[in-house]
Image (cartoon, rainbow, N blue to C red):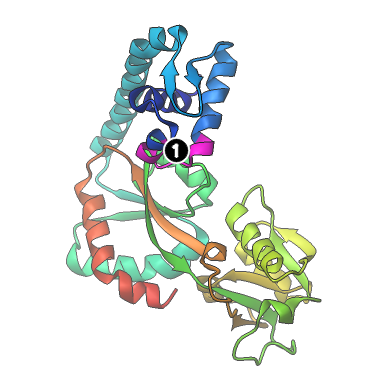
Amino acid sequence: MDVNQIRCFLAVADELHFGRAAQALDMLPASLSRQVRLLEERFETRLFLRTTRSVSLTEAGAAIVGDARALVAQADRFEARIRTTRRAETAVLKVGAIDSAAAGLMPQLLQLLRASHPEIEIQLIEQKSIHLLPKLLSGSIDIAFCRPPDIRDPRLHFRTLFFETAVVAVPEGHPLAGRAHVTIGDLAEAPLIVPDRRSRPHSHDLTIKLFTEAGLTARIAQLAEEKHTIVNLVATGTGLAIVPRWASRIGVPGVAFVPLEMPEGTIRSKLILAAAWPRGTRDDQRDALLAVLDENLAAIESGA
């Protein structure tokens, strides 16, 4: 049984309003409705009576509210026990980061943290967002710098830090390599190397959305998964690639990174970098890390 669906059911049961319940869980109303519908399909019964003006519990829905609260509370205690046990075993703060954050954010942040809190030991785990978020829930990492998913697990708190800007990776001998900047129009006929959407949905969608908004179709020449692989493929002449600016710190000979000029009003096509951690948890070391980040966020963002 999906405990997240039970949490969604309880939120609607408390608010008797899908919009307010979605806001309380930091979800889109459509996503919340889908989770409740999946739960109803699993139980093969309706839990809510919905009209255009009101939402109310059915008899079946009202009957399971108490058990649902007990189930969620038990799941919360289980997760808290895992986190407490792990924290008792080690004082190391385990920080997850996607590749661009590991290359751009973390070197700056760790240097600042060591200066103000030399007693805090950090273990850095570099993985994709889809792998980092389950690790937060299991307690195997304490905080993650990642891309927030379209459907956010209500057990996790997401704090948007800033939007990373994009650059275009091109071979050094390419006609665009010497440009001060390029536009999507400049890439209209270029073969592109794009991340596989199953593993990197945000990076994949960045390229596709930018072309769609420009009224163009991306010419995908190659799918790849890792940023290192993508940049190395650019070096061989396989194609060009749109990547986060911090990916330019990946040192691959024969590749130039040219700033991509974004049309006004395309914030939704940029890459959100967020900090995520389990809701309702306390961690002095994590709080110290976030405090250092908050104090220096403007300077760090200027380089993103």
Quadrant in which residue 24 is drawn: top left
Residue 176 belongs to magenta span: no
Above or below 130: residue 8: above
Q: Is residue 115 left or right of residue 166?
A: left
Q: Which residue sits at x=22%, y=60%?
A: 291
Tell me: 249 left or right of 218: left
Q: Residue at x 66, y 81 (%)?
A: 183
Q: Is residue 168 above or below residue 76?
A: below
Residue at position x 57%, y 64% from top?
269
Q: Position of residue 193 (x, y in %)?
A: 73, 66
Judging by the rendered image, the residue that carries numbered circle 1 is 153
Quadrant assignment for the C terminus: bottom left
Q: Which one is nearer the viewer's eye here, 50 or 167?
A: 50
Magenta segment's dominant SS is: helix
Q: Position of residue 302 (x, y in %)?
A: 39, 77
Under tag 1, what secondary structure?
loop
Magenta stretch: includes residue 28: yes
- Looking at numbered disc 1 in the image, what kind of residue is underneath it? Asp
Residues shaded magenta: 22-31
User: Residue 107 placed where, x, y %?
Assistant: 38, 69
Mark 1 Cα within 10 Å, few/some/many (few <14, many 20+)? many
Taking depth in this image into account, of 48 and 45 the one nearest to the observer is 48
Relative to 108, is 36 on the left or the right? right
